Image (cartoon, rainbow, N blue to C red):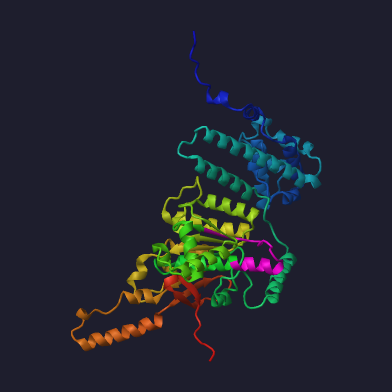
């Protein structure tokens, strides 16, 4: 007679290797912990060798960690930290009772091997802590995959795991520290030499806009630039123009160095509002001078279509990458940028636009302002970590529409405090023609034909002055001057370019 057996439980299905891991003791080196504490108690100067990367939380033994924190507190306050002063500190607290009371401090002195090895002991302790954190993260990954966090689907679990690993990598305490001034001077001279050797005013990556490059010197590594504007001002078109120009300059630099050489960097566009196809069509429309409306409606003549295809073949070689994931999280964006930097090289990141982003998985903000603050801080950290410029587009609040002069100001930025504070540069794109079109005089608003005609003539004069013109208002620049850059804008192809005010005869 056949019997029906119950399916194996999740625990029984768990691989033997995972069971083996769960039964092992976490990495720790108690001898190193005691030896370091003994060295610190013998000579407080040894603290300088470990204080920049080690805290009490890194100790596997909780009591050893509390003793280290007590030593740190005494030294930071300018007090002596030895068995006598710490005995008074720990008296009647019961903290040291599990290890024999304050006599444990004297025992630590006998564990000291050598003061000169204090830094080595510290790094052994710190390395064991990193390994324990990796084990904890791995266990969380396994538990979540088995259903411990039903609120997270598969992709969110991947993002949460990546975020945990990133925090461990960036907060481990070993990186950073002081840079000697001679090293800083050498780096500054190298940058100045690079600028001196190059023709023109561009030191960083070109924006493709002559007058903007003159004001900023191009796009510089580690900078966060905010490009903001009201809807229909052309934010995406301008950002696309800059991204395309940067990618083209990277390609040209590679070809100048060697025929068929691959670019050393690339440009990443995170398009949260438009699809990759829509963005590609916009770039093709701009470069082929074929109206986007005609492309969408299929109204191209053969000559225009041939030009469209030819340009697409040329552009396909550009080191330009588009990610159109909607509502992408900061952690996912960071991971993809790091992967692209590792595989293709990365020279510029464009985000369209930051209000559509979500903060990292596992982080919760109390309000929208705090959420945007977390995103802008994360984008600035990304720019510094990968040493690339990051351009983030931003919406403006509607208070612009209530003013007579509708040119944007810093206070018009949505959730402006954090955006303005974290950005190295803030730029506003403004087109007066857009607002003038809405103010065309109506004959019914005037009590005579003459007054209406006069108003129409004045309106037409202003329209002629504003036709095909745009302003890029550089409201904040941490490393250079502010001011307004006049640009040419061709609405039919959503194309920005340099505005030539004077022509040679």
Q: In this view, does 452 lie above or below 56?
A: below
Q: Which residue is drawn at 48% across and 74% down?
A: 472
Q: In this view, does 165 lie above or below 149?
A: below
Outermost residue toward the bottom in this view:
505
Q: Is residue 155 located in the magenta-colored stretch of the structure?
A: no
162 and 442: which is toward the camera: 442
- Please provide percent x and percent y for residue 26: 66, 33
Q: In which quarter of the image is residue 247?
A: bottom right
76 and 176: which is toward the camera: 176
Q: Is residue 256 located in the magenta-colored stretch of the structure?
A: yes
Residue 95 at least partly seen? yes
Q: Please state the extent of the stretch shown in magenta in the rendering.
A: 248-269
- Please provide percent x and percent y for residue 347: 61, 62
Residue 88 at least partly seen? no
Q: In this view, does 368 lie above or below 441?
A: above
On the rendered structure, is 399 left or right of 83?
A: left
Q: In this view, does 419 lie above or below 164?
A: below
- Please provide percent x and percent y for residue 83: 72, 40
On the rendered structure, is 474 left or right of 436?
A: right
Outermost residue toward the top in this view:
1
On the rendered structure, is 153 left or right of 402?
A: right
399 and 27: which is toward the camera: 399
- Please provide percent x and percent y for residue 200: 64, 78
Outermost residue toward the left in this view:
447
Number of marks present in the image shown: 0
């Amino acid at each position: 007679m056949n019997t029906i057996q119950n399916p194996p439980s999740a625990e029984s299905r768990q691989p033997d290797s995972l069971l083996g891991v769960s039964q092992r003791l976490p990495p720790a080196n108690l001898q190193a912990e005691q030896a370091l504490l003994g060295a610190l108690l013998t000579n407080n100067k040894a603290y300088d060798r470990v204080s920049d990367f080690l805290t009490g939380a890194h100790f596997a033994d909780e009591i050893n960690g509390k003793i280290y924190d007590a030593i740190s507190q005494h030294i930071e306050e300018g007090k002596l930290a030895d068995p006598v002063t710490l005995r008074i500190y720990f008296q009647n607290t019961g903290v040291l009772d599990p290890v024999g009371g304050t006599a444990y401090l004297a025992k630590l002195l006998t564990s000291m091997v050598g003061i000169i090895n204090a830094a080595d002991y510290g790094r052994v302790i710190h390395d064991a802590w990193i390994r324990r954190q990796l084990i904890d993260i791995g266990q969380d990954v396994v538990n979540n995959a088995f259903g411990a966090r039903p609120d997270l689907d598969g992709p969110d679990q991947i993002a949460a795991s990546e975020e945990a690993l990133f925090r461990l990598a960036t907060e481990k305490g070993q990186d950073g520290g002081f840079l000697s001034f001679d090293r800083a001077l050498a780096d500054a001279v190298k940058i100045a030499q690079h600028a001196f050797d190059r023709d023109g005013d561009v030191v960083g990556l070109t924006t493709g806009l002559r007058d903007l490059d003159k004001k900023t010197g191009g796009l510089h590594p580690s900078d966060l630039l905010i490009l903001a504007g009201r809807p229909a001002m052309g934010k995406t078109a301008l950002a696309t123009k800059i991204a395309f120009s940067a990618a083209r300059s990277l390609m040209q630099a590679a070809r100048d160095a060697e025929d068929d050489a691959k670019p050393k960097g690339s440009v990443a566009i995170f398009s949260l509002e438009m699809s990759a196809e829509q963005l590609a069509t916009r770039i093709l429309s701009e470069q082929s001078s074929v109206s986007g409306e005609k492309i969408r409606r299929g109204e191209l003549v053969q000559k225009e279509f041939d030009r469209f295809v030819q340009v697409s073949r040329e552009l396909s070689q550009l080191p330009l990458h588009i990610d159109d994931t909607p509502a992408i999280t900061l952690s996912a964006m960071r991971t993809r940028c790091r992967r692209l930097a590792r595989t293709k090289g990365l020279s510029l990141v464009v985000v369209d636009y930051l209000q559509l982003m979500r903060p990292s998985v596992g982080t919760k903000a109390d309000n929208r302002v705090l959420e945007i603050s977390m995103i802008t801080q994360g984008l600035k950290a990304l720019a510094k970590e990968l040493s690339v410029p990051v351009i983030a587009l931003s919406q403006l609040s509607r208070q612009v529409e209530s003013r007579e002069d509708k040119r944007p100001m810093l206070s018009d930025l949505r959730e402006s405090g954090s955006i303005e504070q974290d950005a190295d540069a803030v730029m506003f794109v403004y087109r007066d023609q857009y607002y003038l079109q809405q103010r065309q005089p109506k004959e019914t608003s005037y009590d005579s034909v003459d007054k209406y005609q006069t108003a129409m003539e004045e309106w037409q004069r202003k329209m002629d002055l504003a036709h095909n013109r745009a302003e890029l208002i550089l409201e904040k620049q941490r490393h250079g001057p502010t001011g307004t850059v006049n640009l040419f804008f061709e609405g039919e192809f959503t194309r920005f370019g340099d505005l030539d005010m004077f022509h040679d005869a």
